[in-house]
Amino acid sequence: MTRKEEVFERVEKSILDFDGDKAVEVAKEAINSGVEPVEVIERGVRKALETVGKKYETGELFIIHLAAAGEAANRAINEVLKPEIEKKGEEIHFTGKVLIGTVAGDIHEIGKTIVSAMLLASGFEVTDLGKDVPIETFVREVKEQNPDILGMSALLSTTIPVQKDVIEALQKEGLRDKVKVMVGGAPVTQEWAEEIGADAYGVDAVDAMKKARKLVGA
């Protein structure tokens, strides 16, 4: 096994062990040893998330595992690898670009984090806007980042109307036709998605990943 392969294996193992601190540490070691950050993502982080996703589908792992793996992967990417890529001016060949966040008034994040992890594993560039995201923030970020997909999560029946409000705000700003909108969350249904004019509804993380790939023609 070459030095590079050892690095990729260690990155992969840290995520499969759901150890965010270790994932950050190993990612830093990889960069310091001269391994390209893009390679670390594609051959370490992404490989680990693909494994977790497959084990989730077969029932070997559960939602809590997806969330923990996604958190570890996101830390390695956002704290170490992505800044390094930007510094070098390199490019990653992504399936598409996704903005995702939990709507205003809602502080639940587990579902969103799991979806982010699955999208990342499927080759998407994912920007997580966090929880309790104001309508104007969604609109501003769509305008500035020009994503292929905007994902909105709502875990409370009292906050799902905000998904509709965001879509209406995008229409007012002339941005609705420039981005595909996907919605999800416990109280969200296919009927609701159709009613508010969303492009897709993700039943769970795996379904959201498949729908996202379909939206960008992947």
Image (cartoon, helix red, strand yellow):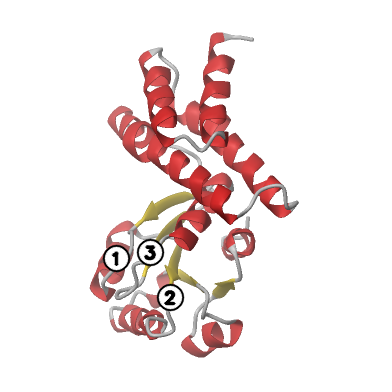
Q: Secondary structure at mark 1?
A: helix
Q: Secondary structure at mark 3?
A: strand
| Residue lying at 56% horizontally and 60% vertically, measured from the top left | 216
- Disc 3 and disc 2: Cα gap in Å? 20 Å
- Disc 1 and disc 2: Cα gap in Å? 12 Å
Amino acid found under the numbered disc labelled 2: Asp
Amino acid found under the numbered disc labelled 3: Gly
| Residue lying at 51% horizontally and 27% vertically, measured from the top left | 11
- Disc 3 and disc 1: Cα gap in Å? 15 Å
The residue indicated by pointer 1 is 143
Q: Quadrant of the C terminus?
A: bottom right
Q: Specify the farthest residue to the right.
A: 58
The residue indicated by pointer 2 is 177
Report the front residue among 194 and 159.
159
The residue indicated by pointer 3 is 101
Q: Position of residue 176 (x, y in %)?
A: 39, 76
Q: Residues within 10 Å of mark 3 (few under 14, many from 20)?
A: many
Q: Which mark is residue 129?
A: none
Going from the N terminus, do you reach mark 3 or mark 1 first? 3
Q: Secondary structure at mark 2?
A: helix
Amino acid found under the numbered disc labelled 1: Lys
Q: Is residue 213 above or below residue 1?
A: below
Does residue 156 appear to the left or right of 54 in the view shown? left
Q: Is residue 87 above or below residue 194?
A: above
Q: Residues within 10 Å of mark 1 (few under 14, many from 20)?
A: some
Do the residues under discs 3 and 2 have CB atoms within 8 angstroms?
Answer: no
Q: Quadrant of the N terminus?
A: top right
